[in-house]
Structure formats: C-alpha cells, structure tokens
Amino acid sequence: MNRPVEVINRPFWEGSIELRARLKDRAWLGVLLLVLLSAAFGLLQLNQAATLTSVQAEIHSLDAESVDLQRECRYWQAELARRTSMQEIILRAAQLGLYPPADIVTIVVPPSDLPAEPAGARATEESAGLAEGAPAPWWFTLGGQIEAWVRGDAP
C-alpha cells in the first residue's frame, strides 16, 4: 500500500481523470440503457393500444352483424308464420284450383282379427339355437305363460 496520502484523503469524485472518464462512460451507458428501456416500454404500450383498438373495432362490427342477423331471423320467422297460416294455405289452394269436397264421407273400418301368432314374430327354441333336449331358458317359459294369459288359457 504505497499510495500517496493525498489520494486516500480525497473523495472518489475528485479522483484522477481516468476514473472520471470511466464514471462518465458508465453514466452515459446507464442513460442510454434507460432511454432504450423507455423506448421499448413505449413501443409495447403503443402496440398493445393498437391491438386493443382493432379488437374493439372488430367486436363492434361483429355486434352490429349479430343485430342484423337477429333482425333478419325475426323477419324470416314472421314470414314463415304468415305463409304457414291456415288462411294463407286455403288462399293458395284456391289459387291452384283445389277446393274442399262439398260432402264428406266417413268410412269406419272395424279392427281386423289378427292371427294368433304372426310368422317370425316370436323366437322359437330352434331359432334360438338351443340344443335338442336342453331346458328352455326362463324367458321362453315366461313368454309362454304371458301368451297363455292373454289368450285366456291361463289356469
């Protein structure tokens, strides 16, 4: 530590010219960094504001389009209701030369007797693939009991 006494007793800002030059360079670098960061932040803010504005404009145009489509939908619903009304149908039929008959004849058809068991309506033991002599599953016996009860053959 062979330094002259005057260097030790002096404050650092009153140091040598080299030290001042290095501090000035660092100060300028700090200022430059601060300006660059401010510029980057400003660009980010500007980009964000522009994006927000364009999205808001798009939302506004889509809302207007939605209102127009709802209006058109209501129009077509009213048009459909008008064209399917009974008065409109009768008027259109009259234009086409279609008129209701003067006298209406009603024919009553009694229910026909259905066959006891339609062909292929009920599965048989053979169609179920049961082996010869094997006991029938429970649903065959239950189905037979229900069929006998419906026919009135039940004990």
Image (cartoon, rainbow, N blue to C red):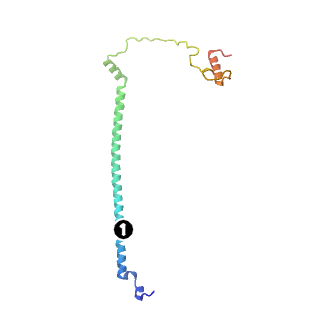
Image: 145 above or below 76: above
Does 30 sit left or right of 152 as displayed? left
Q: Quadrant of the C terminus?
A: top right
Please, which residue is most extreme toward the front here?
132
Query: In this picture, is 142 found above or below 39?
Result: above
Rendering quarter of residue 106: top left
Q: At which x and y percent is residue 83?
A: 35, 26
Residue 55 position in % (x across, y down): 35, 49
The quadrant of the rendering that contains the N terminus is bottom left
* Residue that numbered label 1 is attached to: 33
Q: Residues within 10 Å of mark 1 (few under 14, many from 20)?
A: few
**Which residue occupies the foreground of this view, 116 or 137?**
137
Left or right placement of residue 54 versus residue 108 in this view: left
In the image, taking residue 121 as reference, residue 76 lies left or right, namely left
Q: Is residue 37 above or below residue 108?
A: below
Identify the residue at image location x=40%, y=88%.
6
The residue shown at (34%, 29%) is 79
Write the residue at 34% across / 63% down.
Answer: 39
Q: Secondary structure at mark 1?
A: helix
Picture coordinates of residue 5 (x, y %)?
A: 42, 88
Type of amino acid under label 1: Leu
